[in-house]
Image (cartoon, rainbow, N blue to C red):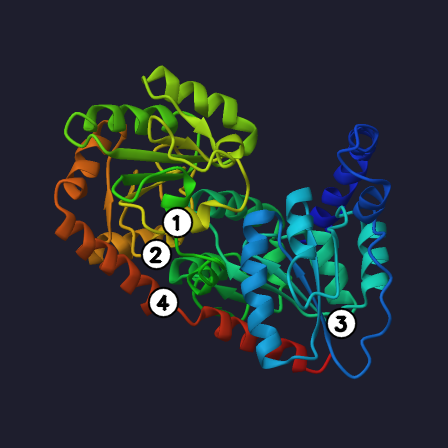
Amino acid sequence: MKPAAHALYTAALYLFSPALAVYYAFKVRKRRMGFAGMAERFGGAPALPPAGGESRLWLHAVSLGEMGVAAILVRALKEKRPGLRIVLSTVTETGREAAFRIPGVEAAFYLPFDFPFAVRRALGRVRPDGLALIETELWPNLIRLAGEGGIPVAVVNGRLSERSFRGHRRFAALAGSPAEELSGVAAREERDARRFEALGARRVLVTGNLKYDAPLPAGSGAGARSHGFEAGDAVIVAGSTHPGEEAAVAKAVRVLRSRHPSLGLLLAPRRLQRADEAEAALRAEGLTPVRWSAWSKEGRPAPDRVVLLDVMGKLAGAYEGAALAFIGGSLIPHGGQNPIEAARWGVPAVFGPHMQNFAEVAEALVRQGGAIQVEGPFALEMAFETWLSDPAARARAGGAARDVVEANQGAAARTADFLLGLLEKPR
């Protein structure tokens, strides 16, 4: 990043700092964040002792979804180097809570704001030997100040959607890019690697998508049947849905029930705060959902075979035993959510035209027959019917989806080797 642009960026941060301080003071007052959390945002990370004879790696995962990727990577790193010290940072409360639950983590804290004083303070307290940013977290001051301190900085599971890449490229043409100052990039896919290279990143490798290496949830065995359905129900799991998608899925289910009376629906909105909105959309289409947070205590099937999954951490296991899956965020220009969660259970998926966030995964699933991509909401009914009316074809599609996952595993080991190699380079 060019010096003048970097100075302008930092000046803009300070210009908006009063508003930022007021916002976080409000969060503390409303008890949405404690004083310790606010201190961490201003560089007050845990003060850690020197790592001794081992290295300390700082991993940053912006939110809960990326923290799942971090857990996969932590496990792989610990398998290769058990003594490695690993600390985690995040931006969200749910991400921070998840970080504390990951085995083998020395400390977890909020990422400091990108003010130079906050970054310097955090680096001095954490004492990392390396810094790894998961996916697309390009913070100019964090990257520059770590580099100036001799700390290698890498992006892992690196991804840049077409939209994000266009924005970064326009900025880079005028001001340069923080990617130029990275020590390396472990990209998910070839297209991600090319985009990072176009922004000036050096040592870009394609190591694969870490999400392929996610373990199946512990205690699996019941899946959708344990979420309010009977053994004979054909259940569609609509995962991580966004506004407008609940109505489209509900309409398709309502119409299909005339031919498939035991058809069930388990729907999980992407954000739990939208549970009321999602429920209203289901009811508007004539369905009568129950909320899992309340109905799970009943211990019996949902009366209308429609369950709104309004608790965190249940979706990944709910795909097991489903007839098929709908992948949220794909009927709208969001870029799609993770189709691997369903595929690893051998569940075929249906998704819309907007799968840019998982482009190569989606293409592989469609190419191998493990998924159907539709042009819009109007085509959902036909896509669902394709597999509901032919259980044998559905089983073959599920097997194809699982094969795609198994063929692409190994990214965790490759990414761990990449990071350990950076740590071993002379500082």
Under circle 2, the secondary element is: loop
Q: Earlier in the sequence, mark 4 or mark 2?
A: 2
Question: Disc 3 or 1, which lies upstream in sequence?
Answer: 3
Please, what is the three-letter code of the amino acid marked with disc 1?
Gly
- Seen from the viewer's position, the closer of residues 358 and 350 is 350
Horizontal and vertical percent for residue 259? Answer: 14, 29
Q: Are marks 3 and 1 in contact (CB under 8 Å)?
A: no
Q: Residues within 10 Å of mark 3 (few under 14, many from 20)?
A: few
Q: Of the residues shown, which amino acid type is indicated by label 4?
A: Asn
Marks 1 and 4 close (CB-CB < 8 Å): no
Q: Residue at x 53, y 34 (%)?
A: 293
Q: Secondary structure at mark 3?
A: loop
Secondary structure under badge 1?
helix
| Residue type for callout 3 | Gly
Mark whose residue sits in front, 2 or 3: 2
* Disc marking residue 345: 2
- In the picture, measured across the screen, residue 175 lies left or right of residue 248, that is right
From this view, report whether residue 347 is shown above or below residue 424.
Answer: above
What label does residue 246 carry, if any? none
Label whose residue precedes the other's in the sequence (1 or 4): 1
Report whether 294 appears left or right of 247: right
Query: Where on the picture, by quarter, is residue 233?
Result: top left
Residue 223: assigned label = 1
Nearest to viewer (mark 1 / mark 4):
1
Badge 4: residue crowd in 10 Å (few <14, some 14–19, many ≥20): some
